[in-house]
Amino acid sequence: MTVKPAAGVRLLAGAVLALGVTCAGAVQAVPVAAATADATYAALRSARPDGRVAPVKGLVLDRDVFHFEFETGAFHFLAPVAGRTIGAVFLGQGSFRLTPATPAERRQLALSSGAGKGFEVLADRFEELVLLFADDTAQEIAAAAPSETRTPDPKAKQVYERWFKRQRNDFQMNLQLRLLADLLNSPGLTSGVFMALLEGRKLPLALAVVDQNGAEALGAITRAGAEHTMLYIPDPNRGGAWYLCDRKAEVETGRFSPAKRLAHALHYSVDTTIQRDTDVAGVTTIRFQVLSPGLRVLPIHLLERLRIGTASYAVAEPPAAAAASPRATAPAASPTATAPAASPLPTASAASPAAAAPAAAPEREPAWKPAAFVQEAAKQDSDAAVVFPEPLAAKSVVLLRIGYQGDSVLTDVGGKNFVVGARTSWYANLGVFSDPATFELVYHVPEGNEVISIGKQVELRTEGRTSTSVWRTDTAVQVAGFNYGKFKKLAEREEKSGIELAVYTNERSLSGGVNTGRLAQDTMADAINAARVFTTYFGPLADPHVAITQQPQLAFGQSWPSLIFLPYLAFLTGTDRMNLGLLGTKEFVDTVGFHEFAHQWWGHLVGTASYRDTWLEEGFADFSAALALQHTQGWGAYEKHWRGARTALFATYLPGSQIANIDAGPIVEGERLATRKSPYAYQVLIYSKGSYVLHMLRMMMWDPASPVPDARFIAMMKDYASSFAGKSATTADFQKVVERHLVPAMNATGDGKMDWFFRQWVYGTEAPHYAVDLKLEAEAGNQVRIKGKIAQEGVSSDFRALVPIYLELDKEQYVRVGMVPMVGTTSAAVDLLLKPPKKPRRALINARSEVLAKD
């Protein structure tokens, strides 16, 4: 979880710290034969045009929203793999058309491609194209154009080699690995993945995909969910997922298939050692349950610079036993099985007595077997996977142990200060932020340095010149992380929330002799305030302890379960920042700690289902930071936050931007909002507009007559947090929670639904402008009359807003006196007779930024 970096701030750099593993006291290894490379994968990588040719004329292939017409030319088939034709090179004349399934995706495609107004369809022509498939494409071509066998065409081979090189170096996706999953996980499947590599006359290098497992199966975009159809452009400046959507038939019927999951991680045991002048090496043992029958190919997430050396597995519980075991459906205790030999990599170290899981009787050692693995060269198509030699039965529980080594996990910036660079892939895993599991983490580091990890430390010991710490999580968490260096600790318990807080500052300053340790008290004060405010509004955390750690990157913060990285900048005073030339950073410093603390709720206690729901994490954390500002600095600071948000949303002067950020798309487009026309839109919309949505809901629920004006909003937020604790929520889930807490003002359409609000603010891009002419007239008996007109402009005919009217009694002291419902481009006459407690200074609307509007 990150916050917006301060403008113009560079990150610190330094030499790479190499890491290694020397596991004293390692468990006795179980002999296992060495794994061999998977033959089917090797055949897929080596497949080239084999001389089978199918001349075609006017052949059409339709795959969801993609329409390919092969006007004249020939398909040159790749050599069969596992008895199946899995690809072909087309040479000739052809055309391509993509007709988006939804208006939102049409708009997104227009922005991404740079199309002008009136865009409907993306179309282009091509003279060569590479198809890779595990569906019935070969049969469809054969039915239209029987093949003949010739000497392999040199040009077809040349074209394939060029595209294979582009796959590795430009796309950096292992498409053969994706084919392998369909061939081995579902033998005989004829509805598998379809992929087309092409370059048009205007269209840059592109990959068109229809994947029944969802686009996430290719690894192009994280948390892509079940969306099956994608057009991906690898261009570093204007690329990404230009189109990503559910199948057109699902959109039309409103019935969507769930994302396909192959396995569910139950528990991770991660053993890592940090040692001077060596590389990183580690062993991760994953206890998982098989969800897909016949599983053989299992993707692994791991930093590409960490090279896998060994992989082995053991069936811990067959399906019948797993079904009867609570460990099959709940987070498991640390496995007791030992690892096979992992030469030249180490095995995991022996668990200490304190770390060992209690057992009624010793378990019989499962039979470990070698597994093949896939991992191509770093900076190429280095997607990793394990290939089991046998199909794994659904519902069985399996232990998978992976050994790896490499570098680029840590960077040494001097003075016992280290940057942890590989945030989510420093250990082998089945996916982060989508599959919570329990963790046991063992770290071996040089004596004098220390690790601050997620979870609770259950053991610390020193053997020779190596310090070993063991950490465990009590509940399943989304991701594991750690900070590393030499720290000073300040600890305190916040009594109201019951959260145990600890602040860790680096012992040695990075620049200018600044002693950041003396600012630990200020950081602790912010943590105490955050714990109080957020627990009051959102409810308790599952794990009531949080470590806030300093890290050397100047303007980058991140939150892990029970662990927070705060940037170096956050520990500097205003004077320090001025002396170092770090001007314009006050707002970032004031909010970064609150924002990252809020992620303990939004992102860790409650996860999100896909990239379309990221605003429920980042937007909620941004709102939470504003809420903390209000409770610590007053309404003025809260309102300043929303003024800044409006400036960012409506700005058109940012370098490289061709449109205002708010016009880049709805917030449910997630990271895809950053396009060639709107390079900053993701950051601005997901954070600022996402938080504004929550603020508008809060203000509609605000009850000034109540002793606790926020009581209804608090009830809603606690309901959301408790209902989805330990789960992944969607935007639709949150809307249902909001609808459980409707107040009359929110029921604008009289149906008890909030469709009108979410359609406008979450799935839409509109924002109104208000022309206001309000005057105060004195009346008898110390009364005043507000007279005038409010006009709502620049919105569609069904756009709805509740526009609040205020009196300002003293400077920035406001009292709300009415709400005006407005629909479409319209105006409303105002005539209110009031008796305020004192003579007002003026009448105005939207004093608390209740409606996101253009100033």
Image (tube, rainbow, N blue to C red):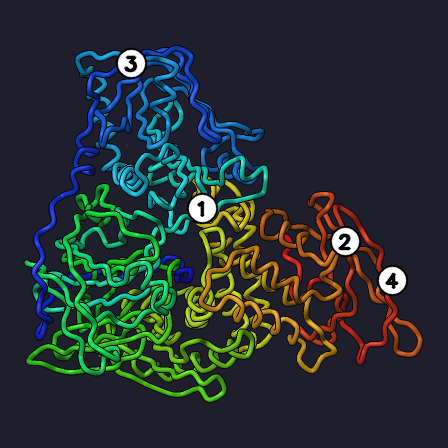
Of callouts 1 and 4, which one flags the residue occurring earlier in the amino acid sequence? 1
756 with respect to 274 (left or right) = right
460 with respect to 788 (left or right) = left
* Cα–Cα gap, marks 4 and 3: 81 Å
State the SS at label 3.
loop
Of callouts 1 and 2, which one flags the residue occurring earlier in the amino acid sequence? 1
The amino acid pointed to by label 3 is Ser
Q: Which residue is mark 4?
A: 831
- The C terminus lies in quadrant: bottom right
- The N terminus lies in quadrant: bottom left
Q: Quadrant of residue 411?
A: bottom left
- Mark 1 or 4, which is nearer the eye? 1
- Mark 3 or 1, which is nearer the eye? 3
Q: Which residue is mark 2?
A: 822
State the SS at label 1.
loop
* Cα–Cα gap, marks 2 and 3: 66 Å
* Cα–Cα gap, marks 3 and 1: 36 Å
Of callouts 2 and 3, which one flags the residue occurring earlier in the amino acid sequence? 3
Kindly identify which numbered label has been placed on residue 226: 1
* Cα–Cα gap, marks 1 and 4: 52 Å
Q: Are marks 2 and 3 in contact (CB under 8 Å)?
A: no
* Cα–Cα gap, marks 4 and 2: 16 Å
Q: Which residue is mark 3?
A: 147
The amino acid pointed to by label 1 is Ala
Q: Quadrant of residue 63?
A: top left
Which residue is pictured at 19% across the width and 47% down the height? Answer: 389
Q: Quadrant of residue 80?
A: top left
Q: Are marks 4 and 2 in contact (CB under 8 Å)?
A: no
* Cα–Cα gap, marks 1 and 2: 38 Å
